[in-house]
Image (tube, grey):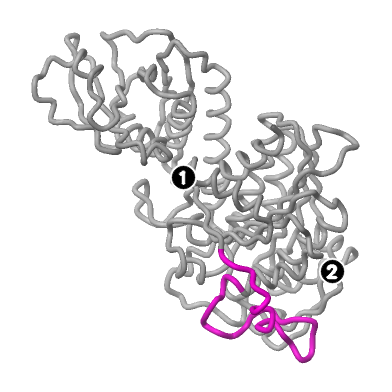
Amino acid sequence: MTYKHIQHIDKDKDLIIPCSKGNLEYLKELVSIENLDFEGEFSSSQLFFGKKGNRIYALGLGEEKEVAKIGEAFRKLCFDNKKYWKESIQVYVEHLSVNEVKKAAIGFEMAAYEIGQFKSKKEDNKELSIVFATTKDISLLLKESKDTGETINRIKALIDAPANQKTPEYLGDWALDSAKQTNFKCTVFNKEQLEKQGFNAVLAVGQGSVNPPVVIVMEYMSKPGAKIDIGLVGKGVTFDTGGLSIKPSTNLHYMKSDMGGAAVVLGVMELVAKLKLDINIVGVVASAENAVDSNSYRPGDVINSYSGKTIEIIDTDAEGRLVLADGLSYINKQFQPEQLIDLATLTGSVVQTLGYAAAGMFTNNSEMAKNMSAIGYEINERVWQLPLFADFEAELHSDIADLRNFSGKPIAGAITAAKFLEAFTESHEKWMHLDIAGVSFGDSSYSKMKSATGYGVQLITNYIKSLSS
């Protein structure tokens, strides 16, 4: 899609009129119908026709409490109706704030995402121009919105891609291409390099797969020679069978999505570079395929890690925390970032706790928690803080290794996973773990099967923007 800005609408052409609940004044000026049969309820829409036969879409934005998610209303309207639109459609946004216009533009761009990327016959999608009408200066905002929406769509395509296409090496190639296109540094460590450097936990997870593991290191430095402001680490398990602790077959095909945390890190690095933010940031993706083979690591094994800590394997399906452990240790040792955030589709436990409404947030830094929570509410990518009490450390005790990877208990799984990761942060005072298992991938009104949501790219990018400002 392309985006244009005009000062005033042409009332004889197709247009969209967003209306908050009960505020229909401008719509009434354009539509000569006494009973509109429309009240502006959130994401409701009504089609009217102008005097020239042009389409006029009334779009409900709901109440003030729903402003954080208005982008979804624009996305749904566009997704459902774009096949009826010609080359362009106007959107009257004079009465919307600049932030609301940004949400609208991102929503339009997200409506362009097509999940059927591997179909032999694809729909012939026409290029659509969205024309925003307002006297406000929104030209730069529209560019940023397009960049944001495009990047979200790219990481959604990555998450939705099948595991036979999306190997760890594929993620590495994706990152290298992204770095070339948007101008940041990217290094991909192959299996031999991982062995030399001691990424033992990553190697253990991936040793049962024909597709070798990789670690991707991305560096965006707008201030050469200065400290690293923030480090990001993403779990990149491109398919998770559970290993020898194998998962049930029900919904196993959805385990292609277990690299959702890695996708966020890849997307954020790309978007930060596109926006040329004034910040130094490093992103690390630890990627492996957790497969079943005669060479797979076993429950009861003791493995080493990049940090030097030994780990007793209780459950091979608790593999995400192993690759993250190496990623966290590496980024701490090599880059010493001021702030450190990891993201992962880590546990089913967080879904049992928070459902599909928010990500689990773990940190001992109250300032980070407050900032991340506020940003999450503002853009409708919410987080909810869960505890890191010392009481849970006993759940990771091992008689034969430094710690074990799973408590073996059916309670507090998300918390004990976070406590495991904490052991590899070297007591970093500004570390945060986000468990995005319930929000990265799920049911959607845009596909018949579960699919990627795009969660996290805006959340982390806006958080980074708050640091750079």
> CA–CA distance between discs 2 and 1?
36 Å
Per the image, the residue denoted by label 2 is 307
Sequence-wise, the earlier of marks 2 and 1 is 2
249 to 150, vertically: above or below: below
Per the image, the residue denoted by label 1 is 380
Measuring from the top left, give residue 63's x and y in whole percent. Answer: 31, 37
Query: Looking at the image, which is closer to me, 421 or 254?
Result: 421
Query: Looking at the image, which is closer to me, 437 or 190?
Result: 437
Image-quadrant location for residue 12: top left
* Residue at the farthest left position: 34
State the residue at coordinates (91%, 37%): 225
Q: Is residue 66 left or right of residue 12?
A: right
Q: Is residue 222 left or right of residue 131?
A: right
State the residue at coordinates (21%, 13%): 30
Total labels drawn:
2
Residue type at mark 2: give it: Ser
Measuring from the top left, give residue 145's x and y in whole percent. Answer: 53, 29
* Residue at the farthest front position: 366
Q: Which residues are magenta?
A: 386-415
Q: Mark 1 packing: few (<14 Cα in 10 Å), some, or many (20+)?
A: many
Per the image, label 2 sits on a secondary structure element best described as loop
State the residue at coordinates (48%, 13%): 136
Q: Check residue 100 for magenta coloring.
A: no
Q: Is residue 24 left or right of residue 145?
A: left
Residue type at mark 1: give it: Asn
State the residue at coordinates (85%, 52%): 336
Per the image, label 1 sits on a secondary structure element best described as loop
Image-quadrant location for residue 16: top left
**Residue 257 visible in the picture:** no
